[in-house]
Image (tube, rainbow, N blue to C red):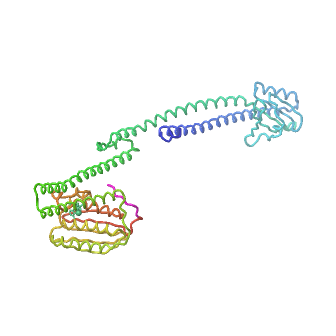
Amino acid sequence: MTLLMRKSITLRTSLLFTLLAAVVFAFMGLVIRASVSHHFSEQDSSALEGKLELIRHILLTNESGDAERLRRQLGDALVGHHDLSVRIRHSGGPELFSSGHASIPDAVLQKTTVFPAKGALPLLTWSSEDATYRAVAVRVLTPNPPQSWEISIAVDTRHHAEFLTVFERELLVIGAGGLLLMAVLGWLATRRGLQPVQHMAHVAEGISAQRLQDRLPATDVPVELQPLARAFNEMLDRLEDSLRRLSDFSSDLAHELRTPINNLMTQTQVSLAKPRSAEEYREVMYSNLEEFERLARMIADMLFLAKADNGLMIPHQEPVNLRQEIEAVFEFYDALAAEKMVALSLQGNAIVTGDPLMLRRAISNLVSNAVRHSLPDTTVTVRLITEQEMVRLVVENTGDSITRDQLDRVFDRFYRADASRRRSDEGAGLGLAITRSIVRAHCGQITVASNEGKTRFQVTLPITPAPLEATGVRE
Ligand SMILES: Nc1ncnc2c1ncn2[C@@H]1O[C@H](COP(=O)(O)OP(=O)(O)OP(=O)(O)O)[C@@H](O)[C@H]1O
Ligand SMILES: [Mg+2]
């Protein structure tokens, strides 16, 4: 049952609904019963006071002091009031009159209040074996002859009690019926309210890797479900994008491997076509070695990225003087820069905590790209800016712009903005993907902006990275 309750919102909501209705009904029942009972008590109280007034009047007008006449008059006044019982006695003395089937106990007569009283008379109650009585007990003074009387009038409340019992039973039956109705209606209402969720589930069921373009109707669903539908659609957008990149990646990978392997095959077939000299074989093998090296580099790069994807790339943590690293990279690219007539300039200083080899690799990728894509007679500028807890490393060059569409793809694996350079000797298109993995593993960020021939890559690194766990980079 509890398992079912945990699983079914419909059941849980309708039970809660019923429980709340039960509390409200019980409260209303108690209030109604209390007010009916209060009404009866007020009714009894005013009937008793009316009779008391009548008896007092008879006592006041009986100036002769004739006890027998008084009893007769009192008896006449009470004719027809079967539910009333009266007991009258001289204060502390003998009893003058009593009537009715209730025997009013002495204890009641001893609790007299002087009449007429200022406020409402206190109602006294007692029960005999088969009935409960309400009574008033008063002391009345008559001037002529001067006498003090103790009068008690009681009313049998049996018929009120009987009415209340029947009334309670009816309330219970109505309440139980109402509760049952509420439970059924609550269940129906919740089921109906949850119908859009079922519709959403139905749409979601039809979505698969091949049909990722379907979306939930985010505007047709109730407002409460709109954030869920939107979040779900956004998740599908991200999944679709990741899947597209993944399938691009696999086809790119196949192409990237095919070219060098074809080259190797062709060269080997050609050289095997006829007998050749040792010198010729050596030349072919050198050329093959170059292709093998290219392949090995690409595979090593891909392994590096796969490790980053799986959170296995954990950088060392040691102080790294970024200026020194950049100077070393500049030295490496000095010849290439001179050949392309590009100047290299370095500004600023910064020290961060990180992995020197990885950071040098990231810087090297950025500088190599900048030099490669620069126009002659321009300068590649690297700037280091230390802020409060961050270091900004900016690599700027003037040359080919990267278009808006290409900007968010340049970090993708095998992506090269210029299609004509694809699969040329220039590079596999893994450099920026690796750079981004390294930056992320250092809890940093990398962004790119390109405008009117000026391309600027900006890396932001925390001076001391957060306690490093394996920082995975997932697409
Ligand atoms: N400074 C830049 N100016 C213009 N385009 C750039 C610049 N840096 C990168 N790009 C574009 O981004 C693409 C991806 O760069 P990335 O470094 O990932 O690959 P690559 O340089 O082509 O190959 P690899 O780095 O693997 O040898 C490049 O092919 C180039 O088109
Ligand atoms: Mg590159």
Q: Is residue 283 above or below residue 49?
A: below
Residue name at image x 28 percent, y 60 percent: 300
**Quadrant containing ligand 2:** bottom left
Asked where in the image residue 421 lies, by quadrant, the reply is bottom left
- Left or right of 177? Residue 144 is right
Q: Is residue 56 in the magenta section?
A: no
Q: Is residue 469 magenta?
A: yes
Q: Residue furthest top?
A: 80
Q: Position of residue 83 (x, y in %)?
A: 75, 28
Give the dominant element type of the magenta stretch: helix, strand or loop. loop
Where residue 303 sits, quadrant-wise, is bottom left
Q: Is residue 160 left or right of residue 334?
A: right
Residue at 40% from the left image edge and 61% from the top image edge: 469
Q: Closest to the observer: 437 or 235?
A: 437
Residue placed most toward the observer, 284 or 425 = 284
Magenta segment: 468-475
Outermost right residue: 94
* Quarter in which the C terminus is drawn: bottom left
* Percent of width and height locating residue 417: 20, 58
Q: What percent of the width, then of the height, locates residue 200?
A: 37, 40
Residue placed most toward the observer, 458 or 311: 311
Q: Is residue 207 left or right of residue 175?
A: left
Picture coordinates of residue 211, whole percent (x, y):
29, 42
